[in-house]
Image: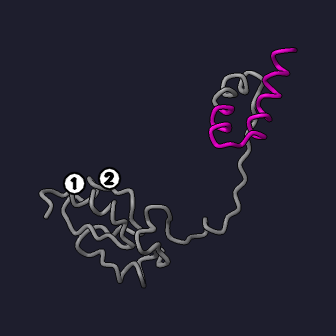
Amino acid sequence: MFSDLNQCIDFSNLYAPEHLILAIENQERYLANIINAGSVFLGNYSCESAGDYASGTNHTLPTNGFAKNYSGVSVDSFVKKITFQKLTDEGIKNIGNSIELMAEAEGLYAHKNAVSIRLNYLENV
């Protein structure tokens, strides 16, 4: 069905398996290419049941292809994260027009106006 391991990995990334077993030689060479999998088992001795019961990896994994968007449940799943950002007058001048275009394209005119008001103020200072 597939002519080489790269094609297999491409298919696996589309499928986004809950468990992916790389029972191949030099499996580390392929790790950077794996972008969608719940948990990856490396080598002939790393069976899924080891991950389920004893090797210490997460057992609550995304099923039905959800590994395309989600990781397994971990402590990080329960961590509240807050992002912070601060724009200077030069910063809003540099990205303001792009923000206005995107907000208008989405029909979010209050978002656009929040930038436009600031840009207009900076032009008149």
In the image, the segment drawn in magenta is: 99-125
Query: Tag on residue 33?
Result: 2
Quadrant for the N terminus, please: bottom left
Q: Secondary structure at mark 1?
A: helix
Front position in the image: 31 or 92: 92
Quadrant for the C terminus, please: top right
Front position in the image: 91 or 44: 91
- Counting residues from the start of the chain, the first of labels 1 and 2 encountered is 1
Q: CA distance from mark 1 to mark 2?
A: 8 Å
Counting from the top left corner in percent of width and height, residue 114 is at 80, 35
Q: Residue at x 61, y 65 (%)?
A: 76
Vertical placement of residue 9 versus 54, above or below: above
Q: Count the labels in the image.
A: 2
- The outermost residue toward the top is 124
Counting from the top left corner in percent of width and height, residue 72 is at 50, 70
Q: Secondary structure at mark 2?
A: helix
Residue 79, quarter of the rendered image: bottom right
Front position in the image: 32 or 99: 99
Query: Tag on residue 6?
Result: 1
